[in-house]
Image (tube, grey):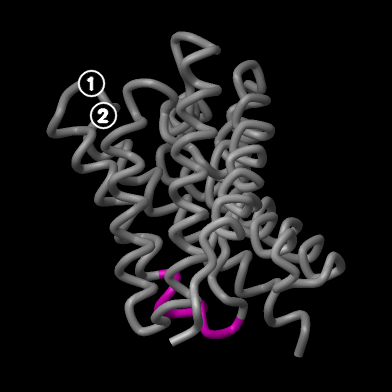
Amino acid sequence: MVINKYLAELLGTFILVGVGSMGILAVGGAGGAAEIIAIGLAFGLALLAAIWVVGHVSGAHFNPAVTLGFLLNRDISLSDAIGYWIGQFAGAGVASLVIWAMAGSREAVGLTATTYDDLGTAIVVEILLTAVFVWTILAVVRRNMSQAPLAISLVLVVVHLAGIPFSGASVNPARSFGPAAVAGDFGPIWVYFYAPLIGAAVAWALYRLFPIEES
């Protein structure tokens, strides 16, 4: 059923955002190297779990920027992309509501939101890291599907290790939307919408420039 793909995207994004957010709360923020490593592993391993449990249903996007990359590559229809986007944003929102219920305050949800100190730096970092992430996904699913879950998850870990101090390492509009919507603070969110989408378009252009033969 087509609806199952959209539900899989909702559930996968729920796992990614929910478990990743719990990782942030568990270490109390991203103030030091150990905390950054822990958060990176939380998001990366959450993505791996989501890929394993529902990735076979939808292709395991769990990220509007990833869906845009596949849409530009004509691997997914516009109607399916819209369904994926709705599922992804809904999954992130539900995950943050669960975090609110678990932590007992909207302020705790706010701690899981992505933020930055310098707008220009955040834009560059989000475009760059999203481009690396989406390009990796487009390439690895074409080259070797058996390696895709681990490769993609490890790259997300690297994205967090590199990006948390500069932009919060979103690379995912839905991941930033969920905590912002539940916490009621949309102040810094817009960079996490347009920068990852630009990064996805850059990733697709690079993928087309350096094509990979299917294995």
Instruction: State left or right for residue 126 relative to residue 173.
Output: left
Tell me which residue sits at (25%, 50%) in the image: 41
Residue 28 circle label: 2
Magenta segment range?
A: 50-57
- The answer to if 56 sits in the magenta stretch is yes
Q: Quadrant of residue 75?
A: bottom right
**Above or below, 26 relative to 63:** above
In the rendered structure, the answer to whether residue 82 lies left or right of residue 158 reads right
Q: Position of residue 55 (x, y in %)?
A: 51, 77
Q: Residue drawn at (56%, 49%), measured in percent from left and top?
A: 203
Give above or below for 131 relative to 81: above
Q: Which of the image's four quarters has the N terminus?
A: bottom right
Horizontal and vertical percent for residue 184? 65, 25
Secondary structure mostly seen in the magenta stretch: helix
Most extreme residue toward the left is 34
> Which label sits in the foreground, 2 or 1?
1
Relative placement, left or right, of 75 versus 26 is right
- Which residue in the protein does label 1 denote? 31
Percent x, y of residue 69: 65, 57
Residue 207 in the magenta stretch? The answer is no
Q: Nearer the viewer, residue 198 or 117?
A: 198
Secondary structure of residue under mark 1: loop
Q: Nearer the viewer, residue 213 or 107?
A: 213
Q: Amino acid at mark 1?
A: Gly
Q: Amino acid at mark 2?
A: Gly
- State the residue in front, 26 or 13: 13
User: Label 1 crowding class (10 Å Cα cut-off): few <14, some 14-19, many 20+?
Assistant: few
